[in-house]
Amino acid sequence: MRKKAKPADLEKKLYEARKNYPGAVKEFSDPKECNMVGAWLGMATGQISIDAVLARNPGITTDAAKFKEGMIRLQEDAKANPSMLDTFRALAGMCDHPTEENFLKITKADHDKGLRTCQVSSNPFAQEFVWVSDVGNGGAWVVSSQPEGPCGVVQLSRFEKDQSHTSALFWRYIARKAATNPSGTVLPGLSCSAVDQGEYV
């Protein structure tokens, strides 16, 4: 699991947005598109009836019931987390006044959302463990691993008894790897010293 955006990404995104602004002005000059932005924001905030938007825009969806269900869920999410509508508000602001400043607000709102959003990915793998009695409090199951690749990455993940649980039925999986050749390179310009060697419980 990792953050979708990093604080340092913002300047690059704003630079790209400034370059794209002249072309974006044309898109935001389409009244039909801007009316839809207003309709989405109105439905999400509950200021405009979902049924009214469906009646005025029959081509908005092929499944009205499913659309309504999704919009009701969006309204509930927005009540719990009002900032999730910041991008909609920025889009509406750009429709009202298509200035570069308002266009950059869309990028900022999207970036702020990325800072609060986690990306979850899974990577299937197989590991073999050996019991090591002198690790942790009373021993642990530690990955049996040999150095791999140009960085000499060794897997150091382990299972330890969960000491916080009195039943002693539970185990904690601690994921970790180490680069035994930190002076090597994985790809041109990417040093082995940059390999993530943190512990993840």
Image: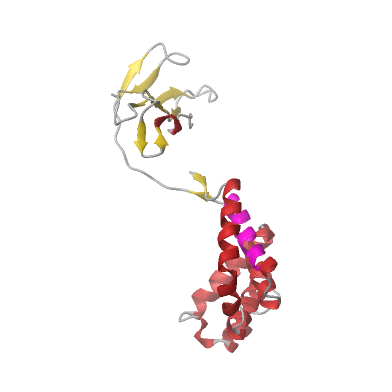
Would residue 151 be found to the left or right of residue 170 on screen? left
Q: Position of residue 77 (x, y in %)?
A: 62, 61
User: Where is 119 relative to 158, above or below?
Assistant: below
Q: Is residue 111 visible?
A: yes
Residue appearing at x 45%, y 33% in the figure? 194
* 180 and 32: which is toward the camera: 180
Q: Position of residue 26 (x, y in %)?
A: 58, 79
Residue appearing at x 40%, y 31% in the figure? 192
> In the picture, residue 130 is in which quadrant?
top left
Q: Is residue 13 magenta?
A: no
Q: Is residue 116 visible?
A: no
User: Where is 90 relative to 171, above or below?
Assistant: below
First to last magenta residue range: 103-115
* 57 and 21: which is toward the camera: 21
Q: Position of residue 114 (x, y in %)?
A: 57, 53
Q: Position of residue 186 (x, y in %)?
A: 35, 36
